[in-house]
Image (spheres, coloured by chain):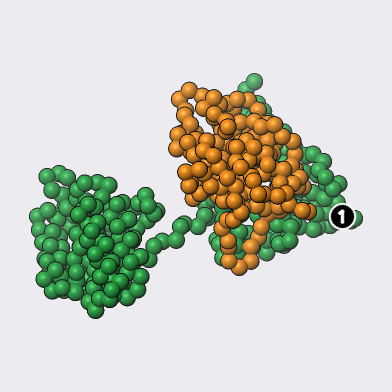
Chain colours: A green, B orange
């Protein structure tokens, strides 16, 4: 058999012969098409005769996929995609039975089946790609971050720092880190993570717990440094307990706490940032970061 | 006792030890699950349960039954990590055709080379079972297979 013949046989086997039509309950047919869903399973369409009309149904497969991925509520991207497709192809979402259906006259059936298959393939293969990312944690200290950024601006280093860095973790998918840079010391790269925590507004204890979990994730490499900057100005009892909690864990989890409300700690923190970034150890970082900024 | 899935894997692939450790613990079915806000587009005969292991792990069991086709789909997962998928439908093929044709009712399990994630086929082993027209029957088969205690659960009235 020549190559064209082999190709023809392959296409025949994998596309044409894999269309399977079987009777199903309720005087209908199941049409199995030669495509597979995101799990690698066959896709089927149910076809029922209803007097002079034909009813096409997904039997609930689309809503099942949405449900399995937690995208069955109307505010999710996958559901919005389904709603748009249903509108474009004049399909009905039957909320009572969980099915996507289309009712057409017999003479429009060929086009209706094609459209229905387009929608069902899109939904059963595309949903994992439009999956909602887990909610990102909010920054822990938006006010303090602004204050630190202002100090960095006055020290002329604000453009030499990466802002809003994401630290990928095990406790959560992504941690919000306010400022980031790295140093190269004896050919070893040390990551510096700065996290600002407002303890003088709300949820001080909850923020302290998050910081300790973040510190666990940040210390996976020995040479990385986490610096937690807190603002305890006007501290109430909650923030005092939160600072005590963080201090208790700071030695074991190897992170440092600076109180921005205390002038000496504030100056020490800023001096350290400036000396690292403009100093010799920060040279490779400055070169790298300026190239990155030029690219973006 | 839950099935030893290593017997279904080819040499060069292996079971996921942490998953197998958990699914072989004593487990108990409890009512409950996630709740969504606003209008929900739910599949036919959908179910949601919490499954609690003897060591306190909380797993999430969701599923639905397509009674037009007599098909059923159940997922047991922890967070986004899927431990088992109980499927009843035709046409499943294992990666590289391993173990020949898989029966209508089958249980997917993760292996090191083929984890249970979307966009990819995974290994499954056959289970006795015919078409399911009621999610309760499907749930019972699943719990029997994984030795999950269903005490307190009652079949749905339809």
The spot of residue B131 in percent (x, y) is: 75, 39
Q: In the rendered view, would you say A213 is above or below A163? A: above
Chain name for mark 1? A
Q: Quadrant of the N terminus of chain B?
A: top right
Q: Is residue B44 left or right of residue A49?
A: left
Image spot of residue A82 (x, y percent)? 63, 59
Question: In the drawing, does residue A62 fall left or right of residue A284?
Answer: right
Q: Residue at x 54, y 29 (%)?
A: B4
Question: What element does badge 1 sit on?
Answer: strand
Residue A41 position (above or below residue A132): above
Residue at (45, 37) in percent of width and height: B18
Question: Which residue does the numbered mark 1 point to in the structure image?
Answer: A50
Q: Quadrant of residue A296?
A: bottom left
Q: Quadrant of residue A193?
A: bottom left
- For this orientation, the residue located farthest to the bottom is A234
Note whether residue A3 is visible: no
């Amino acid at each position: 058999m020549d190559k064209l013949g082999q190709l023809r046989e392959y296409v025949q086997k994998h596309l044409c012969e894999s269309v399977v039509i079987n009777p199903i309950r309720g005087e209908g047919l199941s049409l199995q098409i030669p495509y597979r869903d995101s799990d690698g399973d066959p896709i089927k369409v149910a076809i029922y005769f209803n007097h002079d009309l034909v009813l096409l149904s997904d039997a609930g497969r689309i809503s099942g996929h949405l449900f399995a991925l937690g995208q069955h509520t109307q505010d999710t991207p996958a559901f919005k995609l389904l709603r748009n497709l249903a509108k474009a192809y004049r399909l009905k979402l039957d909320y009572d039975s969980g099915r996507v259906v289309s009712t057409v006259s017999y003479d429009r059936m060929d086009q209706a089946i094609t459209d229905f298959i387009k929608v069902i393939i899109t939904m059963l293969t595309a949903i994992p790609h439009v999956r909602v990312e887990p909610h990102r944690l909010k920054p822990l200290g938006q006010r303090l971050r602004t204050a630190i950024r202002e100090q960095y601006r006055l020290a002329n280093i604000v453009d030499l720092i990466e802002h809003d860095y994401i630290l990928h973790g095990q406790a959560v998918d992504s941690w919000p880190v306010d400022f980031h840079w790295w140093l190269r010391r004896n050919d070893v790269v040390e990551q510096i993570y700065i996290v600002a925590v407002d303890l003088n507004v709300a949820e001080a204890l909850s923020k302290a717990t998050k910081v300790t979990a973040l510190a666990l994730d940040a210390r996976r490499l020995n040479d990385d440094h986490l610096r937690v900057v807190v603002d305890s100005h006007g501290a109430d009892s909650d923030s005092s307990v939160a600072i005590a909690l963080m201090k208790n864990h700071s030695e074991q989890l190897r992170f440092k706490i600076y109180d921005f409300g205390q002038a000496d700690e504030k100056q020490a923190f800023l001096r350290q940032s400036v000396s690292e970034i403009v100093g010799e150890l920060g040279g490779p970082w400055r070169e790298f970061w300026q190239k990155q900024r030029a690219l973006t | 006792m839950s099935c030893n899935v290593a017997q279904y894997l080819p040499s060069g692939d292996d079971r996921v030890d942490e998953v197998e450790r958990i699914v072989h613990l004593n487990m108990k079915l409890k009512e409950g699950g996630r709740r969504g806000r606003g209008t929900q587009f739910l599949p036919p005969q959908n179910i949601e349960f919490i499954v609690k292991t003897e060591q306190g792990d909380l797993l999430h069991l969701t599923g639905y039954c397509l009674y037009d086709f007599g098909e059923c789909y159940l997922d047991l997962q922890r967070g986004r990590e899927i431990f088992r998928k109980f499927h009843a439908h035709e046409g499943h093929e294992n990666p590289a055709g391993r173990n020949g044709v898989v029966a209508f009712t089958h249980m997917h399990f993760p292996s090191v080379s083929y984890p249970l994630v979307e966009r990819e086929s995974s290994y499954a082993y056959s289970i006795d079972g015919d078409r399911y027209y009621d999610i309760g029957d499907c749930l019972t088969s699943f719990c029997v297979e994984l030795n999950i205690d269903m005490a307190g659960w009652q079949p749905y009235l339809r």
